[in-house]
Amino acid sequence: MLDNPQAVRATFERFGAQEEQLHQQMRYQILSALTPNHRRELGLLIGELAIAASPDLQDAATRIDRALSSSEQQRILAAHQAFQTQSRQLREQMRTELQSELPAGHPSWDRGPRNGSAPEQRRQLDAGTIVLMTLSPQAPRNGTTSIR
């Protein structure tokens, strides 16, 4: 049993808030990477997805990716990579802090790679998928690749 479950909960809440802040920063960077016309087009597309009886997220991501300029794609991919790096560092910091809050002899929090594979083995996402995952309420926000 944990010595201080409130401390563990507070740690999760604090790191969750920091993760959300990182996500909001990436969202801002992605929106800033888009031209005004592309932001409008993206808003229309996300609106279409919201009212569609059966939204096709894969098709939407492909449409977004094809519409983006190479400069927009590069800026989006860079923002996502920076988010992933910062998020991974934040999770490692949280694991270290949580481990220090566990009583002596308690099993470690670290259970190995998440999502079934190490980060370097995961499929590289295209800019359209990243935009959709970041900005659309219909898409997953946890970094999974379930759009594809």
Image (spheres, rainbow, N blue to C red):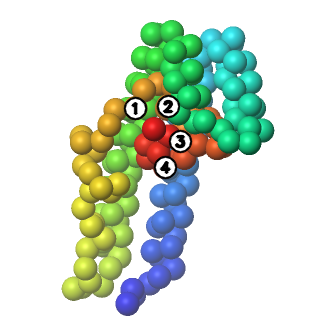
Left or right for 126, reference 95: right
Residue positioned 39% across, 86% down in the render = 2
Residue positioned 74% across, 24% down in the render = 44
Residue positioned 37% across, 61% down in the render = 94
Query: Separation of disc 2 and disc 4 at Cα?
Result: 13 Å
Tag 4: residue type?
Asn
Farthest residue toward the bottom?
Answer: 1
Question: Which of the two labelled residues, at mark 2 and mark 4, occupies the earlier sequence position?
Answer: 2
Residue positioned 47% across, 67% down in the render = 11
Q: Where is residue 100 drawn, in percent x and y?
A: 30, 73
Q: Please determine whether, in this image, residue 19 is positioned above or below residue 108.
A: above
Toward the viewer: 141 or 90? Answer: 141
Query: Separation of disc 1 and disc 3 at Cα?
Result: 16 Å
Of circles 2 and 3, which is in front?
2
Query: Separation of disc 1 and disc 2 at Cα?
Result: 6 Å
Residue hosting label 2? 129
Whether residue 25 is visible here, answered yes or no, is no
Residue hosting label 1? 125
Contact, CB < 8 Å: mark 2 with mark 3?
no
Q: Residues within 10 Å of mark 2 (few under 14, many from 20)?
A: many
Element at badge 1?
A: loop
Tag 1: residue type?
Leu
Contact, CB < 8 Å: mark 1 with mark 2?
yes
Tag 2: residue type?
Thr
Q: Where is residue 51 drawn, in percent x and y?
A: 78, 38
Q: Kindly identify which numbered label has been placed on residue 142.
A: 4
Give the tally of numbered discs.
4
Contact, CB < 8 Å: mark 1 with mark 3?
no
Residue hosting label 3? 23
